[in-house]
Image: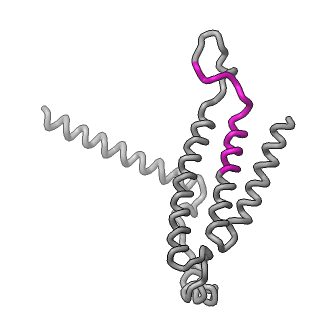
Amino acid sequence: MIIDLSLILVMGVLYAVGVYLILDRSMTRVLLGLMLMTNATNILILHAGGPAGLAPFYSKDIAAEDYSDPLPQALILTAIVISCAVTALILGIIYRSWLLSKADEITDDAEDIRVAEQDAFDKEEDAAAEFDASEFDADEATREKAFNEAEEKKKISQTSAQQTVSKKGD
């Protein structure tokens, strides 16, 4: 019980610090925040996997409930590989940014400022929607009657097609 509670507490702290660091404008802090959040996610997957059990090797003597589930470990290994790749990518971006501008901070350019200052109302998106009649406006009995009529027409057309084929065969 204490171990589960401490893992959940550590996971919460890692998520909180990771989100705080990701919201900063420094790319190095964003990278550290992303690394903390991936570690917190790995702990979450590990905790969601349930209690530890026996190794997942098959034996006739061991009941199926006693085995540990290998899926959480596989997911964690996959998450580690992906986080390493993303970390390498962000490190490359940080290095290139440092070479070009001797800083790793994300700055606002003219387009960012223009978008931030523009009005939030968009005439096309925020206009009132026109009334559109639906094919589902009728009640259940009317829809069922229309469906049954369509089924009858389908049966009649199938029987007439079968009769035509049988007449050609004679």
- Is residue 38 positioned above or below 62 on the image? below
Q: Farthest residue in the right direction?
A: 2
Residue 106 or residue 147, whichever sits in front: 106
- Is residue 39 positioned above or below 74 on the image? below
- Is residue 107 positioned above or below 83 on the image? below
Q: Farthest residue in the top direction?
A: 61
Image quadrant in which the C terminus is located: top left
The x and y percentages for residue 167 are 16, 36
Side (left or right) of 163 relative to 88 = left
Q: Name the residue: 72% across, 29% down.
A: 52
Side (left or right) of 48 relative to 102 = right
Residue 52 on the magenta span: yes
Magenta segment boundaries in residue numbering: 39-57
- Is residue 105 positioned above or below 44 on the image? below
The x and y percentages for residue 147 are 48, 50
Q: Name the residue: 61% across, 36% down.
A: 73
Residue 44 on the magenta span: yes
Residue 141 or residue 98, whichever sits in front: 98
Quarter of the rendering containing residue 30: bottom right
The x and y percentages for residue 62 are 65, 14
Image quadrant in which the N terminus is located: top right
The x and y percentages for residue 84 are 55, 52
Residue 5 or residue 86, whichever sits in front: 86
Q: Name the residue: 58% across, 78% down.
A: 129
